[in-house]
Amino acid sequence: MTPAPPRPARVRSRTVRVAGDDGVAAQALAAALLEAPLPGLLDVVPSYASVFVESDADVLPDAVLEARLATAAAHAAPPAGREVRLPVRYDGPDLAAVADALGTDVADVVARHAAATYRVAALGFTPGFPFLTGLDPTLAHPRHPRPRARVPAHAVAIADHQAGIYPAPSPGGWQLLGTALEAVYAPTRATPFLLAPGDAVRFVPDDGPTPPEPAARPLRPDLPDHPRLEVLEAGLADLVVDGGRPLAGRFGLARGGPLDAPAALRAQRAVGNPAGAPLLEVAHAGPRLRAVDDVVVAFAGGGVRPLRNGAPLPDGTGVALARGDVLHLAPGAPGARGYLALAGGLASDTFLGSATTDLRGRIGRPLAAGEVLGVATPRRARPGFAVRARAPLRSPGGVTSLRLTAGPHPDADALAALLRGRFVVRSADRTGVRLDGPDVPGGQGVSEGTPLGAIQVPPGGAPTILLHDRGSLGGYALPARLHPADVPRAAQLRAGDVVRFAFVRGQYATSSIA
């Protein structure tokens, strides 16, 4: 098991804007920062005209990070990159319409698209999705006004002056011109990412079979060395998480980790685990588990009621399960999600330094009936040890009050609209909390890194609170951000909950490097 930090990171985010908008300066700065990463550096995500940086404020002080940024900028050089020739079958559903809109024929569009040399400006949106500069200006074409619900894996596409490739099925509004005949992302491959920022890409017209969709990379062992719990029945979304996947945002992967870190920490402490040990996050309705050997467990958080052989268990308290006991994380509790820790930590392999499940990245998978969970390091733990719960999940009157600070794109009108009235949660998951309520002025611009807890507002005006599995890059307006201490409370929201915002002083960190 990867060594786990003794406590959750106190995450601090900043956006460093650079000269130019082609990704070259951003890649150079990111490469310099990543050459010898400072302790406490959590993520570095280059985009077209900026670099997004996340750090652990308790390990990496701001002054040290600022000095490192200045040194990196002074010695930055863009990565040399490689030239990658990628075969493409030009059969996209939008090919004819793009040709008609440009007043030409399909063969001419194909010839112009394949004649260009592209450069990978960034990876983001979904894991391995390359944002490519170098599109022939005569092919520039806007996105669809209404995105498709499902774009197939390997689709080669254009939008405005960009080109890109969808690594896996996802919603998307780009114009689809063809199909890449080699996967740009496959987590089960020895080299998961075909492309990297700085690479040159040439599309070669070809014919051949479509590659399969990326298969999920398993992390939990089929036969753990130290089995403890058999899954009798899976829940709605039972995911193994740990402290998160560091320095993975530049690949388009989410850093992940527990959405409600304080609740996860209470469960870990109750069984004597460090904060970053793998544990189980469950949402709304959890699994039924049978102990196949004695084990001490603890549950903390919301969304489900822990029952041992039908009797309720205390929150945040170590409990001994004897062989044959059945633990059911049943629905019916306030909140959305909770955490089950096993003394010794869940047994799991890692991908890029983490056992965290990333469903968008096809890393790991939810629990399945019939599998057996093991512990990484068998050890004794004292049952009955309890860790006090924090404040209630909801404010008085059933309304959750969340504090806002300024975001990366401060906007007085958008902030006033957010503070004006109540919002109702339309839906919520690990990606974000989508809200209905008063219209909020939104917009879009150049894609850049997205901080945890940012309030994203597209042109349509419906805000979303971005959570741990958000895309590493986004192009919508971010006028405000949750106070970091309120992110765990937002993670406990569920459909139908009511939210009000209050503003507190605080400025998002931005700087510029010429």
Image: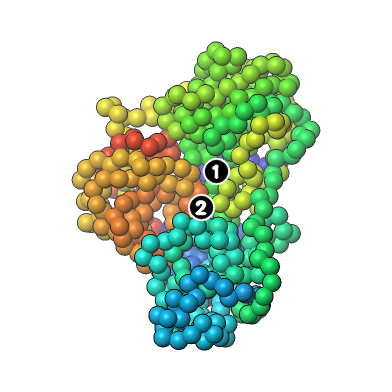
Mark 2 closeness class: few <14, some 14–19, many ≥20 residues within 10 Å: many
Please name the residue shown 64% across and 58% down the image.
Answer: 213
Mark 1 closeness class: few <14, some 14–19, many ≥20 residues within 10 Å: many
Q: Nearer the viewer, residue 441 or 45?
A: 441
Q: Are marks 1 and 2 in contact (CB under 8 Å)?
A: no
Q: Is residue 372 above or below residue 410?
A: above
Q: Which mark is residue 64?
A: none
Could one spot residue 406 in this view of the protein?
A: no
SS at circle 1: loop
Could one spot residue 361 in this view of the protein?
A: yes
Q: Quadrant of the N terminus?
A: top right
Please name the residue shown 75% across and 28% down the image.
Answer: 227
Please name the residue shown 50% across and 22% down the image.
Answer: 305
- Displayed quadrant of residue 241: top right
Q: Position of 80 compared to 14: left or right? A: right
Of circles 1 and 2, the one toward us is: 1
Residue 372: horizontal and vertical position, in percent? 71, 31
Q: Which mark is residue 55?
A: 2
* Measured Cα–Cα span from mark 1 to mark 2: 15 Å
Which residue is identified by label 1?
Answer: 257
Q: Position of 220 compared to 313: left or right? A: right
* First along the sequence among labels 1 and 2: 2
Please name the residue shown 50% across and 49% down the image.
Answer: 469
Amino acid type shown at disc 1? Gly
Q: Nearer the viewer, residue 513 or 460?
A: 460
